[in-house]
Image: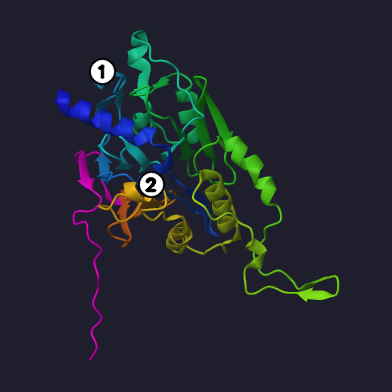
Amino acid sequence: MKKLISLWITIVVILFQVQVSEACTGITLTTKDNSMILARTIEWGGSDLNSQYVVVPRGYEQYSYIPGGKLSGMKFTARYGYIGLSVEQKEFVAEGLNEAGLSAGLFYFPGYGRYENYDPRLKDSSIADLQLVSWILGNFSTVDEAMKAIKKIHIVPIDPRASTVHWRMADITGKQIVLEIVDGQPNFYENTLGILTNSPGFDWHMTNLNNYINLYPGTTNPRTLGNIKLSSFGAGSGFLGIPGDVTPPSRFIRAAFYQTSSPQKETAIETVIQSFHILNNFDIPIGIEFSESETPTDIPSATQWTSSTDLTHRVIYYRTMYNSDIRCIDLKAIDFNRVKYQAVPLDLIKQQPIQPVRIN
């Protein structure tokens, strides 16, 4: 077991050391009746993350990892049942929703965050960064509750060589915040726009939006240049110049404009489908993040899965790089007092199903 834990920690360190391959894009949509939908992608282009959905019942006890791979940090017991989508191992929930309607997720944040140093004397109140989402989902019903509690704990890395992450939290009141830990101190940002990607910090991304004030949906009107009449080649020229690369600043800009230009839908399920359509634009194909000789060939995409969470109706939806069919888990259908803890692969069969069309 010790060797297995050590292997897991080594894998996680490798994942979070490679800057070009871990990327995430998050958006937020609301319906006309104010249902709230949070959607996001998660990327890793080096290997299959072996992601699972995790069902956590009320009363389930966990311990945090501490540096060195020991499960002897903070003990936490779930007051609320929740569903999580994990990466690499079941304890590392990257996105999830609890039965109270609180959503939380982590996003890669290299080069800008810095946690406090681990102090063995504080191990009972220390939690690994990759387990913070599980702690939040299991213990709180609102963003405000979580923010207050985070100030009283110590968020530490499993391994000092690994990169940092930052977090998104939202609840059914519509409040959404971003948490970034810099110089050992938690910093909270109100996220009224509802967009999140990766580095640099959230505040920088919001300022950078001002560089794209010229963009607008639709088609540019014809104009004259001297005695020459100019007109658009086609529809959508109002977005001419929007950045199309996969860097976090470019994805933030693109997500912000795609989200805010999308028409508001009537129902939650329409909006969930809409969120998947928007995030189609952020799928990262294998090949563009690596030099040609280093490109992996055993996975079909760097965008390993995309999720969409309906906070209002307590449903989490997902699709994967292996299977683009949208699947869902309805938390209202789960008795979190009786259900057993379980971790199940997102894809039982790693193959896109194809439905034949019969011609008579």
- Disc 2 target residue: 43
Amino acid on which the number 2 mark rests in the picture: Glu
Color scheme of the displayed model: rainbow
- Disc 1 target residue: 72
Is 157 situated left or right of 337 in this image? right
Is 115 situated left or right of 341 in this image? right
Q: CA distance from mark 2 to mark 1?
A: 30 Å
Residue 108 placement (x, y as % from top left): 43, 37
Q: Which residues are magenta?
A: 333-360
Quarter of the image with the C terminus in it: bottom left
Amino acid on which the number 1 mark rests in the picture: Ser
Q: Is residue 60 visible?
A: no
The outermost residue toward the front is 293
360 vs 42: above or below:
below
Report the mark closest to the observer, 2 or 1. 2
**Magenta-drawn stretch contains 358:** yes
- At 38% from the left and 15% from the top, the residue drawn is 118
Of residue 313 and residue 233, the one placed in the foreground of this image is 233
**Circles 2 and 1: CB distance less than 8 Å?**
no
132 vs 73: above or below:
below
